[in-house]
Amino acid sequence: MKKITLSLMALALSLTFIPQKSMAENPAVPTEVVTPAQQAKADAILLRLTEIKNLDKTNMTSSEKKTLKKEVKSLKKELKANNGGVYLSVGAIIIIILLLILIL
């Protein structure tokens, strides 16, 4: 019984001292597989966003700038919706693995 208690206390202490720097380097691991069609659509959206970013906006009217701004917002929203997979942080993966080890 002491061995189980000691190991649980050691586990709890090891989980409380997780270095923040290592978690900041790899904040999330994507777990969704992207199909080639989704990747092509995302590349097209990113290309359009870079085109808009590189435009000379000094000679545009305010209405043209507003339409560009609306287009950028809609493109970013669409890009976010297409890549809205499930993300697990590194800390969550470690906790899941530890729980599986303890259960099994």
Image (tube, rainbow, N blue to C red):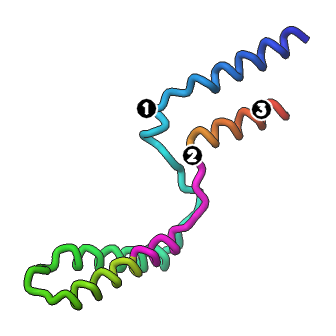
Marker disc for residue 74: none
Label 2 packing within 10 angstroms: few (<14), some (14-19), many (20+): some
Marker disc for residue 101: 3
14 or 61, nearer to the observer: 61
Please state the horizontal and vertical placement of residue 70, each as a whole percent of the image: 34, 83
Q: Amino acid at mark 1?
A: Lys
Give SS at disc 1. helix
Of marks 1 and 3, the one in the foreground: 1
Q: Is residue 74 above or below residue 63?
A: above
Q: Amino acid at mark 2?
A: Ser
In the rendered structure, the answer to whether residue 46 lies left or right of residue 9 reads left
Instruction: Answer whether residue 86 is magenta in the image.
Output: yes
Marker disc for residue 21: 1
Residue at image position (55%, 67%) is 84
Please state the horizontal and vertical placement of residue 58, each as a whole percent of the image: 9, 80
Label 2 to label 1: alpha-carbon separation: 14 Å
In the rendered structure, the answer to whether residue 99 lies left or right of residue 22 reads right
Query: Magenta segment, which residues?
Result: 76-88
Q: Quadrant of the C terminus?
A: top right
Residue at image position (84%, 34%) is 103
Q: Amino acid at mark 3?
A: Ile
Label 2 to label 3: alpha-carbon separation: 19 Å
Of marks 2 and 3, the one in the foreground: 2
Give SS at disc 2. loop
Instruction: Answer whether residue 79 is magenta in the image.
Output: yes
Mark 2 lies on residue? 89
